[in-house]
Amino acid sequence: MQTKIKLYSFYSPSHERIKDEWFLKTLKDDYEIDIRRCEQKGSGRYRTKGWAETILFREDMVIEAIKENWGRIFVYSDIDVQFFKKTEPILVDAINNFDIVLQKDDPQNNACLGFFVARANKETLNFFDLLRKRVLKEGRDQVLANRILKDYNLAGVISFKNIIKGLFKGLLNRFNYGLLPDVFFSGGTFSGKIWQPGMDLSIPKDIVLHHANWTVGVDNKILQLKYVKEKSENESTNCLL
């Protein structure tokens, strides 16, 4: 029987401050934590070689996590996350009928790979194996992941030719995925727009966590983390008055 659920994350040297001052300081749950250091090459900016290598590091780590936790569940989180409440009870309930449940990325209900709970089984392994192969060709994973998930939803209706061609090889078994509620909040959950300092964000009542994405650069991520923390605290105080 699984005792502690494992939580996986990783960080590059540029994100070490976020790991220490935000992620670890705010974590509320008693997970078994596995945080790995990725030696980032180059600037790490979007779609550069260094960025693609970092993405492959994440896919390899998740694939390893699936194999390490076979038959159990595990949690993955990007390091640019701050926690406001315990996540484990919600995640255990959310994964009940799914193979993976991911953070919602935008108002269009795209999935975000930056935070999820997953079952370590062959369906999830097949998904990440396929995703990794696509990343090697295109150098990105977020768009690819949503493309695979959405295409797979259509597979039983209009995509038999694609199945025959092997596009969904490894995903022929039923793969059930869902999205976490909006209280698992990110910079783009409600807006779907790139955030700049000074822009407002609508923060959900009873926020559970905040993923500082939909902004560019470590400095902006830290500013977004501070903004959401302060606004959440102010709104909580006002509710008590």
Image (cartoon, rainbow, N blue to C red):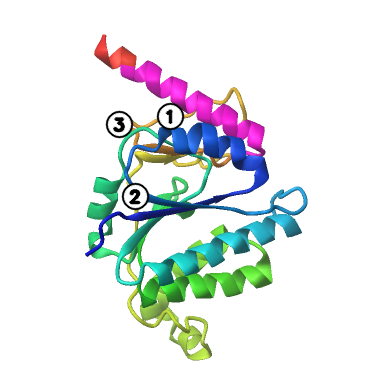
Please tell me whether residue 197 belongs to the stretch shown in magenta: no
- In the rendered structure, the answer to whether residue 52 lies left or right of residue 205 reads right
Q: Which mark is residue 27?
A: none
Q: Position of residue 215 (x, y in %)?
A: 60, 38
- Kind of residue indicated by mark 2: Leu
Give the spatial CA distance, label 2 vs label 1.
Answer: 17 Å
Determine which quarter of the picture holds residue 206: top left
- Front disc: 2 or 1: 2
From what the image shows, is residue 53 above or below residue 219? below
Which residue is the site of mark 2?
A: 180
Magenta segment, which residues?
Answer: 215-236
Determine which quarter of the picture holds residue 182: top left
- Kind of residue indicated by mark 1: Ser
For the point 52% across and 44% down, the residue is 79
Which residue is the site of mark 1?
A: 202
- Front disc: 1 or 3: 3
Tell which circle, 2 or 1, labels the residue nearer the N-terminal end: 2
Task: Give the quarter of the figure containing the N terminus.
Answer: bottom left
The majority secondary structure of the magenta stretch comes to: helix
Looking at the rendered structure, the secondary structure element under dot 3 is loop
Q: Tell how many labels.
A: 3
From what the image shows, is residue 231 above or below residue 76? above
Q: Position of residue 62 (x, y in %)?
A: 48, 64
- Kind of residue indicated by mark 3: Asp
Q: Are dots 1 and 3 in contact, CB under 8 Å?
A: no
Q: Which mark is residue 206?
A: 3
Looking at the rendered structure, the secondary structure element under dot 1 is loop
